[in-house]
């Protein structure tokens, strides 16, 4: 009985068209990038061409049925093939993330931007006002004005860094097409 089950599992017919494992892994990588971009709302609709699954299928010259059938085939192998492919995809993503983090290091401003993605405007705190040297500030009004200028300069730098980071992500997605 066990021999019959094993032989049936190994005789699983390859789908037609069959997608080689390395190509299937590349497709899964691109699909993961696409889902990540869509789920993080990284791109505004008016600034980047919308990328869909159909674009990935077109890139690899397959259709959705071939993708699904091949996915099922690799999952049904039960030799850990699909899991191994997913792990290699995750490793590629981690390497890409490390490369991006090296090119765009985490700064306090970038971290603040990510935490406050709904607003680029911050209200100055008392602690920030107290950090200014007394010799450069004559009155409270001057102190507040200086704080506003410093904040605007920080925000401009933060926005530029955010835009540079987003541009790198956009280029990576557009390379997929």
Image (tube, rainbow, N blue to C red):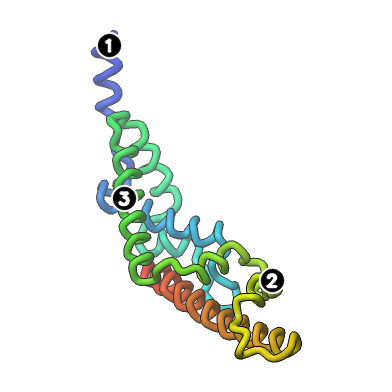
x and y, in percent, of residue 174 in the image: 41, 72
Secondary structure of the residue carrying numbered label 1: helix
Measuring 65% from the left and 75% from the top, which residue is drawn there? 130
- Dot 2: element: loop
Q: As rendered, which of 57 and 81 lies closer to the eye? A: 81
Relative horizontal placement of residue 46, taking residue 139 as reference (left or right) = left
Q: Residue furthest front?
A: 135
Q: Residue 12 appears at what percent x and percent y?
A: 30, 30
Residue 24 makes an appearance in the image: no
Nearer the camera: disc 1 or disc 3: 3
Comparing labels 2 and 1, the label whose residue is closer to the camera:
2
Which of the labelled discs sits on residue 2, or is there none? 1
Separation of marks 1 and 3 at Cα, in angstroms: 35 Å
The answer to which of 107 and 49 lies nearer the viewer is 107
The tally of labels here is 3
State the quadrant of the N terminus: top left
Residue positioned 59% across, 73% down in the render: 45
Image marks 2 and 3: residues in contact by CB distance under 8 Å: no
Give the labeled residue for mark 3. Answer: 91
Image-quadrant location for residue 106:
bottom left
Above-or-below relation of 142 to 105:
below
Task: Please name whichever residue, 168 or 86, is drawn nearer the observer in this view of the structure.
Answer: 168
The answer, for residue 114, to whether it is visible in the render is yes
**Marks 2 and 3, how far apart in space?**
42 Å
Label drawn at residue 157: none
Instruction: Indicate the position of residue 100 as horizontal and vertical percent values.
Output: 37, 66
Q: Residue at x 71, y 84 (%)?
A: 144
* Residue found at the very far right of the displayed protein: 141
Which residue bears the numbered disc 2? 125
Query: In the drawing, does residue 122 fall left or right of residue 7?
Result: right
Q: Secondary structure at mark 3?
A: helix
Q: Residues within 10 Å of mark 1 (few under 14, many from 20)?
A: few
């Amino acid at each position: 009985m066990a021999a019959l089950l094993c032989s049936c599992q190994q005789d699983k017919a390859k789908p037609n068209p069959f997608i080689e494992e390395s190509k299937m892994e590349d497709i899964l990588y691109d699909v993961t990038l696409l889902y990540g971009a869509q789920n993080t709302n990284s791109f505004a609709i008016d600034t980047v061409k919308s990328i869909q699954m159909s674009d990935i299928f077109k890139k690899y010259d397959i259709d959705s049925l071939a993708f699904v059938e091949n996915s099922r085939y690799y999952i049904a192998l039960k030799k850990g093939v699909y899991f191994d492919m997913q792990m290699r995809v995750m490793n590629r993503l981690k390497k890409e993330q490390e490369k991006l983090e090296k090119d765009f290091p985490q700064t306090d401003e970038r971290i603040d931007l990510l935490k406050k993605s709904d607003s680029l405007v911050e209200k100055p705190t008392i602690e920030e006002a107290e950090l200014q040297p007394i010799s450069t500030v004559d009155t409270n009004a001057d102190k507040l004005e200086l704080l506003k200028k410093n904040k605007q300069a920080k925000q401009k730098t933060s926005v530029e860094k955010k835009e540079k980071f987003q541009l790198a992500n956009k280029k990576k997605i557009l390379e997929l097409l």
